[in-house]
Amino acid sequence: MRASKIAYKPVGLAAGAASGAMAGAAFKQTWKVLGHDEDAPDATDEERTWREVLLAATVQGAIFAVTKAAVDRAGAAATRRLTGTWPG
């Protein structure tokens, strides 16, 4: 295993935890801005419509995917700066 991959492991783990927290906070704020309740609906919430449940899932998925990609990319770039090689 290359040194850059080894060096990236702890960075990737920490980045993953941080990106999850950041994405959760971003989704909560986005959901409020969209004019919905404080909490996003659960898929099994009987009082919520299909439209609202699927909209929440779509928005949440997009935010989590973009946040994860941005944090992973930044971590890989930082590893490259430290080791001189890309960790992929």
Image: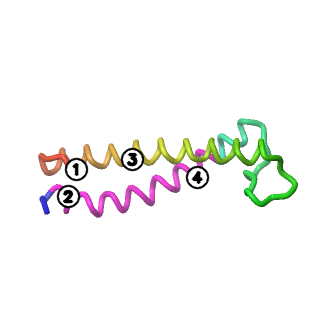
| First reached walking from the N terminus: tag 4 or tag 1 | 4
Q: Disc 4 designates what residue?
A: 24
What residue is shown at x 13% (from left), y 51% (from top)? 83
| First reached walking from the N terminus: tag 2 or tag 3 | 2
Q: Disc 2 designates what residue?
A: 5
| First reached walking from the N terminus: tag 4 or tag 2 | 2
Residue 11 included in the magenta stretch of the image: yes
SS of the residue at dot 1?
loop
Q: Disc 1 designates what residue?
A: 88
| Near-viewer residue (49 or 8) | 49
| First reached walking from the N terminus: tag 1 or tag 3 | 3
Residues rendered magenta in the picture? 4-27
Q: Position of residue 17 (x, y in %)?
A: 45, 60
| Near-viewer residue (50 or 35) | 50
The figure's colour scheme reads rainbow
Residue 76 included in the magenta stretch of the image: no
Q: How dense is the environment of label 2, judged by Cα within 10 Å: few (below 14), some, or many (20 and up)? A: some
Work out whether 46 lies above or below 59. below
Q: Position of residue 21 (x, y in %)?
A: 52, 56
- The outermost residue toward the front is 50
Q: Amino acid at mark 3?
A: Val
SS of the residue at dot 4?
helix
